[in-house]
Image (cartoon, rainbow, N blue to C red):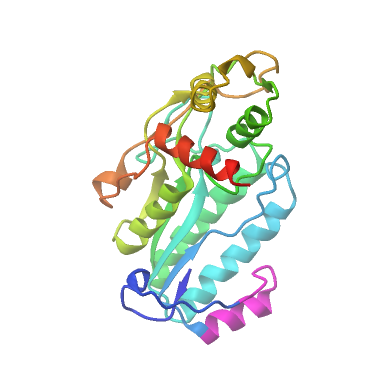
């Protein structure tokens, strides 16, 4: 979201869409110079499910994003919010705190995001740009890739098929996509700087998530826990900790997990 106005544009119903390939440096800079935004939310990245962890495209997005923040600052930008990831943290410890959490990414995706944060934070401090970095945990919602956990179980049960799952002992922090968006809006409108976890702060076992889906659809007998092996290196617990989003940005989620899953189930039913 790019704003050319210093007003609270998020409350302004008018919107102007500018199409641009952010991986093309000339197009990117021309867009920024044309719009001259005061505020920037940068969410773009390569995220093809199952491929993005090790994809070389991560390096292209790292380079392009560094160019974007520089062009933004050069054209008078004041406030930027970038999307980071929980994959920046050291998953071996399970401590994912936005206040002193240990950053040691195990994937190229996480490494490129962590490198971008480090470079962008230092540059923005020098350039007089306010920067917040939202580390996203486990979003779910309508339009999600159908092979991901929540939609794959929903689609199987809606079709009357068995839903093969791992043991489901892994604990994760799920947040509805609407709330993820709201969290980024709250960050943009706040004065919070630095890394901020984008999560609910509540861990739930994957087996409990799929059980909730089974109960909601009335087909719990179709869920097959343990039918799939747990992925090698899959950490037992990944939950957002730190609380800067609520304590400093004043953000609260609008969905609980049960209501969020009902929303997603309703969306898939309509497809």
Number of numbered tags placed on the structure image = 0
Residue depicted at x 70% and y 14%: 227
Vertical position of residue 16 compared to residue 182: above or below = below
Residue depicted at x 70% and y 17%: 229
Q: Which residues are magenta?
A: 19-34
Residue depicted at x 50% and y 25%: 209
- The x, y position of residue 183, in whole percent, is 38, 52
- The x, y position of residue 213, in whole percent, is 52, 27
In the picture provided, is 249 more to the left or to the right than 100? left
Q: 242 or 21: which is nearer to us?
A: 21
Q: 121 or 39: which is nearer to us?
A: 39
- Secondary structure, magenta segment, majority class: helix
Please indicate, yes or no, whether residue 140 appears anywhere in the rendered image: no
In the picture provided, is 58 more to the left or to the right than 105? right
Vertical position of residue 211 compared to residue 69: above or below = above
- The x, y position of residue 165, in whole percent, is 65, 21
Please indicate, yes or no, whether residue 245 appears anywhere in the rendered image: yes
In the picture provided, is 257 more to the left or to the right than 222? left
Q: Is residue 26 magenta?
A: yes
In the picture provided, is 242 more to the left or to the right than 164? left
Vertical position of residue 49 compared to residue 4: above or below = above
Residue ranking furthest to the bottom: 34
- The x, y position of residue 224, in whole percent, is 65, 15
Q: 200 or 235: which is nearer to us?
A: 200
Q: Is residue 72 magenta?
A: no
């Amino acid at each position: 979201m790019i704003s050319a106005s210093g007003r609270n544009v998020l409350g302004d119903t008018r919107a102007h869409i500018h199409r641009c390939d952010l991986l093309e440096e000339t197009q990117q800079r021309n867009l920024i110079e044309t719009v001259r935004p005061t505020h920037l939310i940068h969410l773009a990245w390569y995220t093809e499910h199952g491929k993005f962890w090790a994809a070389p495209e991560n390096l292209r997005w790292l380079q392009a994003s560094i160019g974007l923040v520089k062009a933004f600052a050069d054209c008078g930008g004041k406030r930027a919010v970038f999307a980071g990831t929980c994959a920046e943290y050291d998953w071996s410890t399970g401590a994912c705190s936005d206040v002193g959490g240990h950053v040691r990414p195990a994937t190229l995706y996480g490494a490129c995001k962590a490198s971008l944060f480090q470079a962008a934070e230092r540059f923005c401090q020098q350039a007089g740009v306010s920067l917040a970095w939202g580390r996203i945990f486990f979003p779910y919602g309508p339009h999600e890739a159908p092979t991901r956990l929540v939609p794959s179980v929903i689609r199987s049960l809606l079709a009357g098929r068995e839903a093969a799952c791992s043991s489901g002992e892994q604990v994760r922090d799920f947040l509805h996509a609407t709330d993820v968006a709201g969290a980024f809006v709250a960050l943009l409108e706040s004065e919070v700087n630095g890394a901020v976890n984008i999560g609910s702060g509540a861990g739930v076992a994957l087996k409990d998530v799929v059980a909730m889906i089974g109960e909601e659809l009335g087909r719990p007998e179709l869920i097959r826990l343990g039918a799939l092996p747990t992925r090698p290196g899959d950490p037992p617990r990944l939950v957002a900790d730190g609380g800067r989003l609520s304590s400093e940005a004043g953000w609260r989620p609008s969905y609980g997990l049960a209501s969020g899953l009902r929303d997603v189930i309703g969306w898939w039913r309509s497809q």
